[in-house]
Image (spheres, helix red, strand yellow):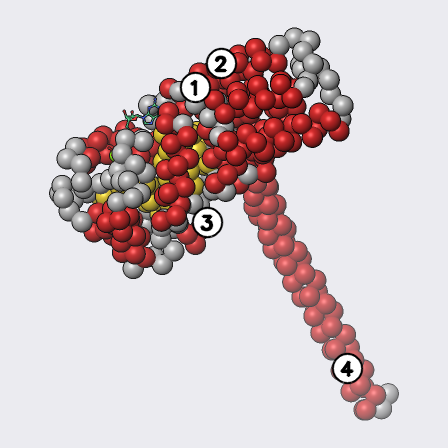
Amino acid sequence: MSFLNKLKSKFSNQSREQKIETDSEVLENIDKQEATFEIYDSKNENNISKIETQIETKTEENEKKSFFSKITSNVKSAFGIEKIKEGLTKTRKTFSDNLRKVIGIGRKIDDNLLSEIEELLITADIGVDTTEQIISALSTRVKKEKYENSEDLYNLLKEEIQKLMIESPSANNDKIYDIPENKKPYTILVIGVNGVGKTTTIGKLAHNYKNAGKEVIIGAADTFRAAANEQLEIWAERAGVDIVQQQHGADPAAVAFDTLKSAQSKNKDVVIIDTAGRLHNKKHLMEELEKISRVMRKLRYEAPDEVFLILDATTGQNAIFQAKEFIKVSNVTGIILTKLDGTAKGGVVIPIANELKIPVRYIGVGEKIDDLQPFEANVFVDSLFEV
Ligand SMILES: Nc1nc2c(ncn2[C@@H]2O[C@H](COP(=O)(O)OP(=O)(O)OP(=O)(O)O)[C@@H](O)[C@H]2O)c(=O)[nH]1
Ligand SMILES: [Mg+2]
């Protein structure tokens, strides 16, 4: 072998040995890495199975939560429907009983019968305009669909009233306690004439918002009536919410300003402002309302988000008159009809919903804190016609 060949063979042997060495190192490394991966894998498996168990538990919890919240909301709404029905007992008894008497059994449908029904609707506080609208729709259907028996009128009348209510803005009252994130603190100004139930309704509203998980603060901007502060304080305590007040005779706009400011600093969700009872024709009192809104707008330019006009159902047609006057001078966004439990004049909800084009948002069906119910058009009509 030549020197060169010897040298080549030496190197090639060396490199083979080295290669073998390198290969075994690589294998060793691979083994090590695999072992590490195995550890990782087993750790990951542990983690993954932990995460999976967590997800499963969370899903189970969420399912349970949504199941319970569904049950709670169903129970609440069933409870609410019962409250509405119970609250409308007087109205239903008078309305349904009189309607059945007029319709009678086996009477033929003629102009006489229709004008008796017209009279009944007017005496049930449905008002002249809405009554005319209903009777005209009724007689058109009787002719077109060829109804002859008076008993058919019971359902026809129910359908026509239902149609009016469903087409009115009062029909869309779900998600009533939801507040858009960009509208916080959601500011509600409560107005109306003396004694209609403003302060009581504020207590009930605060309670309902709180039950819906919202943080509420109320402002005692009725600085006119001597005992107003104490009355609102009692309601705030019952509802478990904060209250802002100043001394008797203070500027109502200053109280409203303080309340909104405090709500902003405490990150509250809802601000409800009580106001003194006022007549719509007292110019300075209506200007006072405008000042309250103007001053609050310095802190939040959309304030107030809602102006709720409180109407007392026991005043019947007068409630519609009040509403028309208030709407002329203030930007009413919703109507709350109180004291439906104490009156047979509940029919007044129909012209209010139909003629005013402002939604009836809630109805008061008693004096207790849980006696304010979101207005539900269908439930209302069913309650009115239930035997
Ligand atoms: N039966 C019944 N009574 C109610 C309802 N809402 C309010 N009231 C009663 O109506 C009366 C007057 O209520 P307030 O809340 O003081 O009325 P207000 O509008 O604040 O009165 P002023 O501040 O004097 O203008 C109280 O006796 C309440 O208990 C209701 O839905 N049903
Ligand atoms: Mg009051």
- Ligand 1 quadrant assignment: top left
What amino acid type should be assigned to the residue bearing mark 4? Answer: Lys
Q: Which residue is mark 3?
A: 180
* Nearer mark to the viewer, of 2 and 4: 2
Residue 52 percent across, percent down from the top left:
59, 41
Q: Residue at x 60, y 55 (%)?
A: 36
Q: Residue at x 37, y 43 (%)?
A: 325
What amino acid type should be assigned to the residue bearing mark 2? Answer: Lys
Q: Is residue 345 above or below residue 331?
A: above
* Nearer mark to the viewer, of 4 and 1: 1
Q: For the residue labelled by badge 4, is the local secondary structure a helix, a strand or a loop?
A: helix
* Nearer mark to the viewer, of 1 and 3: 1
Taking depth in this image into account, of 324 and 164 the one nearest to the observer is 324
Residue density around tag 3, few if under 14, some if 14–19, many if 20 or more, within 10 Å: few
Give the spatial CA distance, label 4 vs label 1: 118 Å
- Pick whichever of labels 3 and 2 is earlier in the sequence: 2
Q: Which residue is mark 1?
A: 344
Taking depth in this image into account, of 233 and 192 the one nearest to the observer is 192
Q: Which mark, by number, is residue 93?
A: 2
Give the spatial CA distance, label 2 vs label 4: 117 Å
Q: Residue at x 32, y 49 (%)?
A: 267
Residue 92 percent across, percent down from the top left:
50, 17
Q: For the residue labelled by badge 2, is the local secondary structure a helix, a strand or a loop?
A: helix
CB atoms at circles 4 and 1 under 8 Å apart? no
Residue 146 percent across, percent down from the top left:
76, 23
CB atoms at circles 1 and 2 under 8 Å apart? yes
Q: Which mark, by number, is residue 10?
A: 4
What amino acid type should be assigned to the residue bearing mark 1? Answer: Ala
Tell me if 229 is positioned left or right of 210 in this view: left
Q: Is residue 64 above or below residue 95?
A: below
